[in-house]
Image: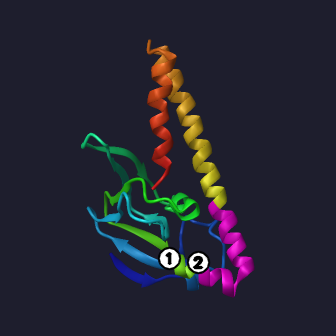
Amino acid sequence: PDHAAAGADQVEGLGDLPPGLSDYLERVSVPAGTVLLHQGDPPGDVYVLESGHLGVETQTPEGPRIRLRSIRPGVVIGEIAFYTAVPRTADVVAETDSVVLRFSAPSIRRLETEQPEVAAEFHRWLATALALASFMSSALSAHVIGLLTSSGLTARDAVLIASLIGPMQVA
């Protein structure tokens, strides 16, 4: 990936990104096919997809890889692992040439020390993104259960299949 400093005020389409973050983030170019996050790696940086498309993939215990979802611009990546301190649960791979805004763990700690008010706004913004992802996952699960049961699948099997959607939000 190609790294360059960037100002948050230069980010089109991410108007809700809190102001004052320009000294704490970097813009990273991610060529198509590059793995941005590796399943099993320790938690660390948080990213926001600025442009392009990313895919979330996981390796199953049986061996095959499963594509879980696509990520579009404006989506936060890595915040769950950052807050829970659990290893990355999936690979995140650039499906097209992409650009992400990287908030490294050290830069977030520096932000918390140097500008606690901005840091608090940043954490509120991340919490809102996390809550929205959780809500969307729940709504999608309910929709999938409804579709599956209306097509003749048992409720038990429909819930089992829909439960696979929950991990899609974790990267």
Residue 23: which disc? Answer: none
Residue 108: which disc? Answer: 2
Is 11 rendered above or below residue 22?
above
Q: Residues within 10 Å of mark 2 (few under 14, many from 20)?
A: some
Is 137 rendered above or below residue 48?
above
| Residue 96 sits in quarter | bottom left
Spot the residue most to the right: 117
Is 1 rendered above or below residue 71?
below
- Which residue lies under the disc numbered 1? 104
Q: Position of residue 2 (x, y in %)?
A: 34, 79
Q: Position of residue 93 (x, y in %)?
A: 33, 59
Please provide the residue range marked out in magenta: 108-126
Q: Position of residue 163 (x, y in %)?
A: 49, 34
Identify the residue shown where x is 39% and y is 53%.
90
On screen, residue 60 versus residue 103, left or right, reads left
Name the quarter where the C terminus is drawn: bottom left
Considering the whole magenta stretch, tell me its main secondary structure: helix
For residue 113: magenta?
yes
Q: Are marks 2 and 1 in contact (CB under 8 Å)?
A: yes
Identify the residue shown where x is 60% and y is 80%.
109
Is 151 rendered above or below residue 48?
above
Q: Nearer the viewer, residue 133 or 84?
A: 84
Q: Identify the amino acid type marked 2.
A: Ile
Spot the residue most to the top: 152
SS at circle 2: helix
Q: Nearer the viewer, residue 135 or 38?
A: 38
Name the quarter where the N terminus is drawn: bottom left
For residue 127: magenta?
no
Identify the residue shown where x is 48% and y is 73%.
102
